Image (tube, rainbow, N blue to C red):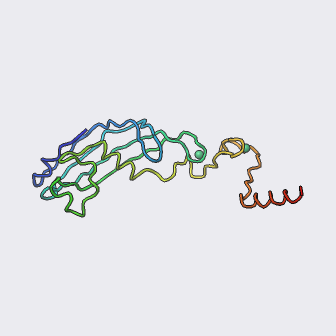
Amino acid sequence: MLVNLSDVLTSEGRQTSMEVPLEMTCFQSRMGSFEIIDKSPVQFTFTNTGKDKARVEGSVKLTFQTNCDRCLTEVPTILDLHFERVVTSPEISTEDEEVDDLSFMEGYQLDVETFVYNEIIGNWPAKILCKEDCKGICPVCGQNLNERDCGCDTFVPDPRMAVIQDIFKGDKEV
Ligand SMILES: [Zn+2]
Ligand SMILES: [Zn+2]
């Protein structure tokens, strides 16, 4: 959805608030593709802050279907986003260095989907864990080690050592 900001960008002192539904059902990025299982409408407040300039404030709460990075258990990721950005009219956007990346602006219109997408990217967690001390899965049998200990020998030799061991074995055969 596009929100026309020409009025707020050109009228001194103007402030408007609105609630916009988010169409996005899935978040796709370099990190993967994650279904959005719950979302609030996007709350926006636009405030004129000078000639051809406005502040965009607001929030949106999103729940994504994600998996623990270590044990792969399904664990939702909730992003409660609060944002504040400065936007300008297209005439001055390239001249003002204070202004953030305005890839979500199309002329005088703000593209809500792109705007929220950028906010998600900027706030996506570096690591998704079901719990802080998740033990992960056994590399041998795949057992979720949070549930029980499988007793496998999970000692993984240093690959450089493995090469040396192979050399020894070769010597014995000669
Ligand atoms: Zn886990
Ligand atoms: Zn195991």
Query: Considering depth in this image, is 168 or 108 the residue closer to the camera?
Result: 168
In this view, the residue in front, 145 or 99, is 99
Outermost residue toward the bottom? 97
- For residue 42, which quarter of the picture? top left
Give the image location of residue 33, x and y in percent: 46, 40
- With respect to residue 72, does 133 lie above or below? below
Residue 38 at x, y = what percent? 40, 36
Residue 70 image point, x, y percent: 59, 47
Q: Quadrant of residue 26?
A: top left
Q: Is residue 9 left or right of residue 143?
A: left
Question: In the rendering, at what x and y percent does residue 118 appear?
Answer: 34, 49
User: Which quadrant of the rendered structure holds the C terminus?
Assistant: bottom right
Choose between 141 and 172: the one closer to the eye.
172
Residue appearing at x 19%, y 55% in the figure: 88
Using the image as rendered, state which of residue 114 and residue 62 is in the foreground: 114
**In the shown orientation, is residue 97 left or right of residue 31?**
left
Left or right, 16 with reference to 70: left
Q: Residue furthest left?
A: 11
Query: Number of marks in the image?
Result: 0
What residue sits 23% from the left and 40% below the top? 2
Q: Residue at x 42, y 40 (%)?
A: 63
Could you tell me which quadrant the N terminus lies in?
top left
